[in-house]
Image: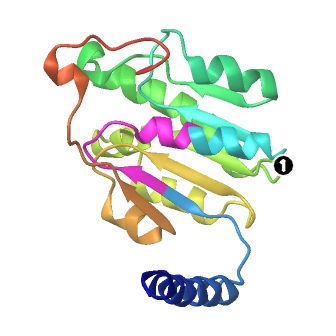
Amino acid sequence: MEEDRHQQRQQRLKEQVDARIAAAQDTRGLLLVFTGNGKGKTTAAFGTVTRAVGHGMRAGVIQFIKGEWPNGEKNLLQQHGVEFQVMATGFTWETQNKAGDTAACQAVWQHGKRMLADSSLDLVLLDEVTYMLTYGYLELEELKAALLGRPAHQTVILTGRGCHRDLLELADTVTEMRPVKHAFDAGVKAQQGIDW
């Protein structure tokens, strides 16, 4: 009796899933946003880049805010042809230099615009780009224009806290990371290979 009920529930679920799969017919590049106050936005984005590269796709990465410290994702993915362009000024609360940070953002953004116009790239990651908008280093309309003008097959991932509502509306998929518990809050030092 219980087995029969289980089988009936699973059959109904299968029919619902099959109907949704049959209804999804569009094939195009997506705009994905990983935002929120929780950790893991960049990690999720790099998981997607790794998956794409594993399927033979070409990807490019722009990292805003990151510094010169060792980068495990870069170490691995560059070996597989992924281009990295890194702002390399470190965290804005460390530099405390708006003019310098704006210039560094604009320099790396030139590579971002190039990647977003490159039809040979299947995936572009703009890591921590939301902060560039929040701090006024990059204009929202310029970013939106580049996203809207990209090749139709190209998927783009945006990461960072406080994503602008216009980008959330433009996005196909939005994931919000929510903090529940983090080892750092309990005094555990960030660890290479795990946290960065």
Q: Is residue 124 left or right of residue 130?
A: right
Residue located 50% across and 53% down the image: 143
Q: How many callouts does the rendering have? A: 1
Q: Nearer the viewer, residue 52 or 33?
A: 52
Residue located 71% across and 58% down the image: 154
Q: Secondary structure at mark 1?
A: loop
Image vertical order of residue 32 relative to residue 3, above or below:
above
Q: Find residue 167 and report its image quarter.
A: bottom left
68 is within the stretch colored magenta: no
Residue at far front of view? 1
- What is the x, y in percent for residue 54? 77, 40
Which quadrant: the C terminus? top left
- What is the x, y in percent for residue 9? 47, 86
Residue located 27% across and 50% down the image: 162
- What is the x, y in percent for residue 32? 52, 58
Image vertical order of residue 90 relative to residue 84, above or below:
above
Residue at far left of view? 186
Q: Is residue 188 left or right of residue 87?
A: left
- What is the x, y in percent for residue 128? 42, 37
Q: Is residue 79 left or right of residue 88?
A: right
* Residue wearing tag 1: 120
Q: Nearer the viewer, residue 9 or 124?
A: 9
Question: What range of the chain is rendered magenta?
Answer: 33-46
User: Looking at the picture, which amino acid does disc 1 mark?
Assistant: Ser
Which quadrant: the N terminus? bottom left
